Image (cartoon, helix red, strand yellow):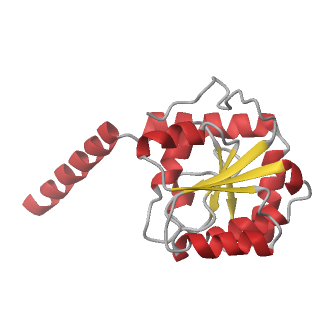
Amino acid sequence: MFQPSRPDGEAQRQDARISIGFVGNMRPWHRADLLLHAFRGLSAYQHLELLMIGDGPELDNLRKVAIDLGLDDHVNFVGSVRYEEVPTLLSKLDVCVIPHATWYGSPTKLFEYGAMAKAVIGPRDTPVAEIIEDGCTGALINCGEVGQLTRAMERLSSDHELRQRLGNALRAKLVAEISWPINVRTILALAGENGKRISN
């Protein structure tokens, strides 16, 4: 389902505006509010679009934050969508953001972003950093650092070649190293090693 729309990972669109986006449940621990504040700090946010895809208990609060920040004309809250629609919506994005993550969770959105060859920004010191190498397969920021998130979005939104390079590198890593067949082989190998240790 998740395939790049073009070889360079960015879809041809009628709208020339750069789109930044987030996909997921709008829950407190995702800290999507950080993304709104960081977006407002962009020097050219009036010419950009922020796409918020998903629903959840924080959605009404996030809408209020967007209004309070004067972003209501630049943020599109898409709400809940069928899973089959997610790849099409991701194809409209140029930069994908994971504003916050827990230490124990591996965000599904990271792999969906990467499979679509999107440039991804995510938090250090979380499982995201096990996949993304800063400057090689994406951009990493310190958790909760709105200024760092703004600067990362500023750089990626203004540099098509960088977005292309990071997105393609992330997809290549996922295809080569992270798939269910590879996971199964790894689990079986570990189970075999543990079995040998127990028998010895």
* Residue 28 drawn at (x, y percent): 54, 76
Give the total of numbered labels: 0
* Residue 90 drawn at (x, y percent): 58, 42
- The residue lying furthest to the left in this view is 199
- Tell me the residue at 54%/33% (across/down): 172
- Tell me the residue at 32%/45% (across/down): 183
For the C terminus, give its image quadrant. Answer: bottom left
For the N terminus, give its image quadrant. Answer: top left
Q: Is residue 60 visible?
A: yes
Q: Is residue 150 above or below residue 132?
A: below
* Residue 41 drawn at (x, y percent): 85, 65
Quadrant hosting residue 75? bottom right
On screen, residue 54 versus residue 147, left or right, reads left
Nearest to the observer: residue 56 or residue 102: 56
Q: Is residue 130 above or below residue 69?
A: above
Q: Is residue 142 visible?
A: no
Nearest to the observer: residue 121 or residue 66: 66
- Tell me the residue at 88%/54% (across/down): 46
Q: Is residue 148 above or below residue 84?
A: below
Nearest to the observer: residue 130 or residue 26: 26
Nearest to the observer: residue 118 or residue 51: 51
- Tell me the residue at 81%/35% (across/down): 16
- The residue lying furthest to the right in this view is 43
